[in-house]
Image (cartoon, rainbow, N blue to C red):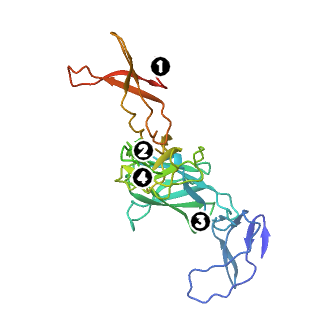
Amino acid sequence: MSADDGDYILDAISTISAPATSHAYTVPAGPAGKTYRFRIAARNVLGLGVWSDEIQLVATDAPASPTLSLLASSRTLTGGQLRFGKPLSDGGSPIIGYHLYRDEGIAGSPFVLIFNGTSQPELVSHNLTGLQTALTYSFQLYAVNKIFRSTTPATQAILIGTLPDRPLNITRDDVAYVNGEIKIKWLPPSHTGGLALTSYEVWVDDGAGDFTTRLAPMVTPTPSDSSAIITGLVHGGIYGIKMTAINAVGTGLAADVVYLVCGDKPTAPAAPTADATTKNSITLAWNAPSSDGGSAVTGYSIYLNDLSVGDWTLAYQGEGYPTR
């Protein structure tokens, strides 16, 4: 075989048995990515016949599979943004674009072309819109060079929906106190991402604000739960508690941390006594309660009733101890 200004002429005569009407021959070429011109003429005992029309071809392989991913922050209830990544090998010819296919969100449904980026290699993302919440769609992405597209596509299955919002109103549940336990209650997120919640996650700090070491393993609330008991705590300790809601997309943001005392309300003080009286005032005296419930007493509330009505009226409320 010899070359002449890019034309390759087959010098050897191939023996072809009649009545074959189509033939093939592999022409060694290189380097990869180089464009060649080809033309062919038939030969018989009288000589070389008329040349065929010319064709230009590139010596290249199919590119490797590209990569395909969903930008997590782009999720909506009807779509999101897909990102394309270059294949590890372009096959010897520059990538000139991408082809993206999608099914109908039903297992076994056909794939249709939804994006043809041929001759637009700079387009490396595609916005998905108009999809149905809670359906899982499958995608296939091919890279294309001048001759071939990827033999094997990149694939991605995407559940349409978003992360849930934070749980709401995490507070202490006022029930009979059990030493070493805190019972909490909450309201579900106002937005669940278009998907059913699968569970909650409860984190308890170590008493020093570190949430990285202690996930309350005994607390695994179900989606229908609105309360949970955290055990294994130290009476009198102050604990930070945070919660997340989880759906099939993943774990949502944590609610604001609430700090609760592992303890109970103080017991009743002893009945007050009259310390002093005047025609305009009564001074009361009392002893502190026998138990502060695990948290230091911060103040007292005094109510009075003048016997004329059944209601009690707040006479004093403040931090610390009232003085004369």
Q: Residue at (62%, 64%) from the top-left corner?
A: 147
Asked which secondary structure carries label 3, the reply is: loop
Q: Which residue is mark 4?
A: 229
Q: Which residue is mark 2?
A: 167
Asked which secondary structure carries label 1, the reply is: loop
N-term mark: 1 or 2: 2
Camera-side residue of 10 and 25: 25
Callout 3: 10 Å neighbours few (<14), some, many (20+)?
Answer: many
Identify which amino acid the numbered label 1 is placed on.
Thr
Q: Taking the image as drawn, is residue 36 in sight?
A: yes
Camera-side residue of 13 and 103: 103
Q: x, y percentage for residue 248? A: 43, 56
CA–CA distance in space, label 4 to label 2: 16 Å
N-term mark: 1 or 4: 4
CA–CA distance in space, label 3 to label 4: 55 Å
Q: x, y percentage for residue 100? A: 51, 57
Against 65, is 70 above or below?
above
Q: Which residue is mark 1?
A: 323
CA–CA distance in space, label 1 to label 4: 40 Å
Identify which amino acid the numbered label 4 is placed on.
Ile
Viewer-nearest of discs 1 and 4: 1
Q: Which residue is mark 3?
A: 150
